[in-house]
């Protein structure tokens, strides 16, 4: 199911619920040498050139303040590096988000000479764009990722960077997309501010990140098992952004015309351990800076799997896992963009515009 939230307009449409199977993904939803660039990188970043690249596009741009450290970014990079070799075996969410972003670009009739794909992983967005009519309107696409291993082995301009310290010059980019990576930043709004600053006036940002209902079943099963065995529970599943405030994140970052919507994906697995294997292969396992002091033992894991199956198995015995993909769309401010009218400036009553009779509410008391 897709839900929409916007600052200035109602939802465009609702789509039917989608179902997918982990591992071999099936869905009913229709889907058509190193060079140092600046501080904040976990390893020496590399940019491999294939053709021309504007030299003004990259320059250090550190965040304006130190955000609270929720996630261990160095550990996250290691997890991504480890997952890179077999990432294609569990890329169904990445590909879904990439196809969705490419589809959104098809409806925007304008050119984007210079674009960046943050959290590019194995190149799902580049592939989705190549199969889309929007490809002719996107010029140079630079793929960027925290993990150099994710970027290896394919052609095109690529740069290893940290999404928390973007190296792009102010007002240098026409389009920035991000596929399922920003939920691992310690300050999502801060990252969005950096993206907005890197965009030219009236530049476009479209990004997908995991939202609050993601892995709710796994979170409940682990909490119940830990409380039963240890007499208390800690954090073993990372927190995710509240999808109800999707457009608000963009507003706080200074974007114009912000829109947020949610795609809830139910994935079915043969066993809870298959879900954990997929998360490991995606590089999406827990990297909380304040991780649980006790390791996840076999006894605890076995009990959590039992609770998971008891609570969330379907008639066919398969268990479900919820993934909530929150997609944000916003524009860098420009004077020529549509502006909201000032309060009280309407020239017609809403009741007259709708052709209905206005009924005043009774006064209290």
Image: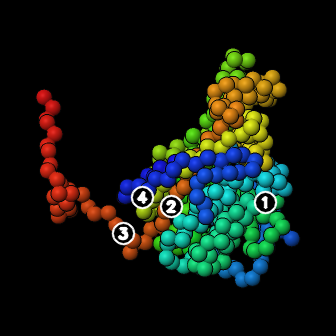
Q: Secondary structure at mark 1?
A: helix
Mark 2 crowd level (few <14, some 14–19, many ≥20, 10 Å Cα) = many
**Earlier residue among tags 2 and 1:** 1
Q: Secondary structure at mark 4?
A: loop
- Marks 3 and 2, how far apart in space? 15 Å
Q: Mark on residue 329?
A: 2
**Residue to which mark 4 is pinned:** 12
Residues at discs 1 and 4 in contact (Cβ within 8 Å): no
Relative depth, front residue between 200 and 137: 137
**Earlier residue among tags 4 and 3:** 4
- Marks 1 and 4, how far apart in space? 35 Å
| In the image, farthest residue toward the front | 316
**Residue to which mark 1 is pinned:** 150
- Marks 4 and 2, how far apart in space? 14 Å
- Marks 3 and 1, how far apart in space? 39 Å
Q: Classify residue 167 by image quadrant.
A: bottom right
Residue at (45%, 59%) from the top-left corner? Answer: 258
Residue 160 drawn at (x, y percent): 75, 63
Mark 4 crowd level (few <14, some 14–19, many ≥20, 10 Å Cα) = few
Q: Mark on residue 338?
A: 3
Q: From the viewer's perspective, is the residue at label 1 or at label 4 nearer?
A: 4
Mark 3 crowd level (few <14, some 14–19, many ≥20, 10 Å Cα) = few
Residue 202 falls left or right of residue 325 = left
Residue 58 drawn at (x, y percent): 67, 72
Residue at (75%, 69%) from the top-left corner? Answer: 158
- Marks 2 and 1, how far apart in space? 25 Å
Residue at (75%, 82%) from the top-left corner? Answer: 51
Residue 271 falls left or right of residue 82 = left
């Amino acid at each position: 199911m897709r839900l929409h939230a916007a600052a200035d307009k109602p939802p465009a449409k609702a789509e039917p619920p989608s179902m997918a199977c982990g591992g071999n993904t099936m869905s009913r939803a229709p889907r058509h040498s190193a060079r140092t660039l600046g501080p904040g990188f976990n390893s020496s970043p590399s940019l491999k050139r294939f053709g021309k690249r504007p030299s003004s596009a990259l320059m250090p741009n550190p965040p304006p303040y130190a955000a609270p450290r929720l996630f261990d970014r160095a550990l996250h990079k290691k997890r991504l590096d480890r997952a890179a070799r077999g990432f294609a075996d569990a890329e169904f969410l990445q590909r879904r988000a990439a196809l969705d972003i490419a589809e959104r670009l098809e409806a925007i009739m304008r050119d984007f000479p210079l674009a960046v794909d943050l959290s590019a992983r194995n190149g799902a967005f580049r592939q989705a764009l190549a199969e889309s009519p929007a490809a002719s309107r996107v010029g140079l696409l630079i793929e960027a990722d925290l993990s150099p291993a994710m970027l290896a082995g394919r052609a095109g301009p690529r740069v290893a960077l940290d999404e928390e310290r973007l190296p792009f010059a102010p007002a240098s980019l026409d389009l920035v997309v991000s596929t399922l990576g920003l939920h691992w930043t310690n300050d999502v709004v801060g990252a969005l501010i950096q993206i907005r600053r890197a965009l030219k006036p009236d530049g476009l940002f479209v990004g997908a990140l995991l939202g609050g209902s993601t892995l709710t079943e796994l979170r409940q099963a682990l909490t119940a098992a830990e409380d039963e065995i240890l007499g208390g529970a800690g954090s073993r599943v990372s927190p995710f952004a509240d999808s109800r405030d999707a457009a608000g994140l963009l507003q706080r970052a200074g974007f114009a015309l912000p829109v947020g919507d949610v795609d809830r994906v139910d994935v079915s697995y043969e066993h809870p351990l298959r879900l954990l294997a997929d998360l490991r292969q995606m590089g999406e396992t827990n990297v909380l800076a304040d991780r649980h002091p006790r390791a996840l033992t076999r006894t605890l894991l076995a009990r959590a799997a039992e609770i998971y199956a008891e609570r969330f198995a379907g008639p066919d015995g398969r268990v479900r896992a919820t993934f909530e993909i929150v997609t944000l769309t916003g524009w860098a401010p420009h004077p020529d963009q549509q502006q909201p009218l000032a309060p009280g400036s309407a020239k017609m009553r809403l009741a007259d515009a709708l052709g209905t009779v206005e009924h005043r509410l009774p006064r209290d008391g």
